[in-house]
Amino acid sequence: MKFLGKPRSQRAAFLPLCLLFLKILHPGHSHLYSSRYAGDKVIRLIPGTEEEAYALKKIYQQLKVDLWQPSSISQVSEGTVTDVHIPHNGSQVLLAFLQETNIQYKILMEDLQKVLEKGSSLPTQRSRRSVSGYNYEVYHSLEEIQNWMHHLNKTHSGLIHMFSIGKSYEGRSLFVLKLGRRSRAYKRAVWIDCGIHAREWIGPAFCQWFVKEALLTYRSDPTMRKMLNHLYFYIMPVFNVDGYHFSWTNDRFWRKTRSRNSRFRCRGVDANRNWRVKWCDEGASMHPCDDTYCGPFPESEPEVKAVANFLRKHKKHIRAYLSFHAYAQMLLYPYSYKYATIPNFSCVESAAHKAVNALQSVYGVQYRYGPASSTLYVSSGNSMDWAYKNGIPYTFAFELRDTGHFGFLLPEMLIKPTCTETMLAVKNITMHLLKKCP
Ligand SMILES: *[C@@H]1O[C@H](CO)[C@@H](O)[C@H](O)[C@H]1NC(C)=O
Ligand SMILES: *[C@@H]1O[C@H](CO)[C@@H](O)[C@H](O)[C@H]1NC(C)=O
Ligand SMILES: *[C@@H]1O[C@H](CO)[C@@H](O)[C@H](O)[C@H]1NC(C)=O
Ligand SMILES: [Zn+2]
């Protein structure tokens, strides 16, 4: 993939950045993240009874496991699958316990460090490809993504306008791309964000892919032309910029923001539990050390506040809110915080149904779809429910590939197929918006 319309003279400018990137990931030729995940395991468990679920919760707390699915210990219950990342020093204890109690389990990853290193391209491949053109089939660091945005803002000013909606906790700019043909007439809009959760790297990769496809096919594809002529897309490729950066430099499995707490040493808030919609109720934690910590108050996180302010200001013309997460292969709509049917159920449901079919038509990958509460789990204070409650009629959360084989470590080889099929779903939803729904 050639960098979109990038003049040769400017390509050289990307080389130093690329070297800088290598420095981050390969300090002194040591292993990624200083081999901190060597010997760690990822195990899938299914407690068969409430007693087993209770015992598992206790041992998870003791061993300080990193829960991959579901995201909070409170959601571990009888009959539900849980995927846990267990540090090497705790895995023997857990395995012994599992054999003793006869709880069903399966080891998904024997050595997390090895999986992590296998899934990323070799540094030499990266640099070679980066010089010849922008590579959308590797994961990009925050710096690379921001430079890419600046570059598109310069070279595609007809369709793209880049702006900042505020600053993160650590002072980074919160950039958004406004994509679409500029027109004097009133236009409706679609908001898309990726990377609310830092470790879900396929999200930002999809946001970049979406922009690339839009620019590349605007002239040749009638559907894309219609989308960009009739709508604006506000695209935020990395919502949780501090967390994303941290997941590159320190902890690959970091999920939250990076804000400090006044009373605890643990940092960060779950940016998808920090919204003012049944804030800090079921499926969210009040404890700052938990991965689903809701924060000291709603919109305490500057990233959440900035996006909420923007959506409040523009909600009159924003018709859809789409948020990209991983992993589960699901297309979710409200409500998350309760088991109830939304007022516009039939329009939203049929949009989801068609989108999932369109996605499956490419490689046969199956997505479940439905209200988040009954399809995934109950969670309060998230962005999708908030957007819906604030008058945006179509709000969805995608949980992209896979279903746990690689989990958060989806290999770069799978970026292209994942984004290709997801693109069809997003186009399908967008075209649905442009039609009248009873
Ligand atoms: C994007 O480009 C426009 C000029 O076309 C400029 O005014 C604006 O500041 C740029 N955005 C950013 C974030 O640099
Ligand atoms: C949306 O997907 C459905 C199949 O689920 C298909 O029939 C329809 O043509 C698609 N629409 C667009 C605009 O892609
Ligand atoms: C339901 O859909 C109609 C038509 O699209 C819209 O006018 C209305 O605001 C929607 N209601 C809700 C609660 O989203
Ligand atoms: Zn997520």
Image (spheres, rainbow, N blue to C red):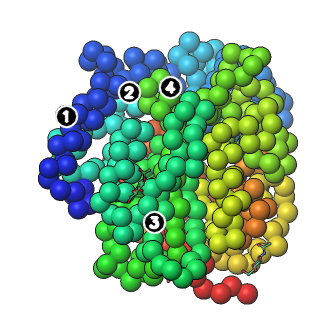
Amino acid identity at mark 1: Thr
Spatial separation of the CA atoms under disc 1 and disc 4:
23 Å
Amino acid identity at mark 4: Asp
Ligand 4 neighbours mark 1 (CB distance < 8 Å): no
| Residue 87, above or below 319 | above
Residues 408 and 244: in front is: 244
Spatial separation of the CA atoms under disc 1 and disc 2:
19 Å
Residue furthest left as drawn: 8
From the image, tell me which residue sits under label 3: 179
Spatial separation of the CA atoms under disc 3 and disc 2:
39 Å
Amino acid identity at mark 3: Leu
| Residue 150, above or below 172 | below
Which residue is at a point 35% across and 75% down the rendered structure image? 218
From the image, tell me which residue sits under label 1: 124
Disc 1 or 2, which lies upstream in sequence?
Answer: 2
Which residue is at a point 56% across and 54% down the rendered structure image? 193
Ligand 4 neighbours mark 4 (CB distance < 8 Å): no
Q: Residues within 10 Å of mark 2 (few under 14, many from 20)?
A: some
Spatial separation of the CA atoms under disc 4 and disc 2:
15 Å
Which of the 4 image quarters holds residue 431?
Answer: bottom right
From the image, tell me which residue sits under label 2: 114
Q: Is residue 104 left or right of residue 409?
A: right
Q: Residues within 10 Å of mark 4 (few under 14, many from 20)?
A: some
Callout 3 touching callout 4 (CB < 8 Å): no
Spatial separation of the CA atoms under disc 3 and disc 4:
32 Å
Disc 1 or 3, which lies upstream in sequence?
Answer: 1
Q: Residues within 10 Å of mark 1 (few under 14, many from 20)?
A: few
- Which of the two discs, 1 and 3, sits closer to the camera? 3
Secondary structure category for the residue under label 2: helix
Report if residue 9 is visible in the image.
Answer: yes
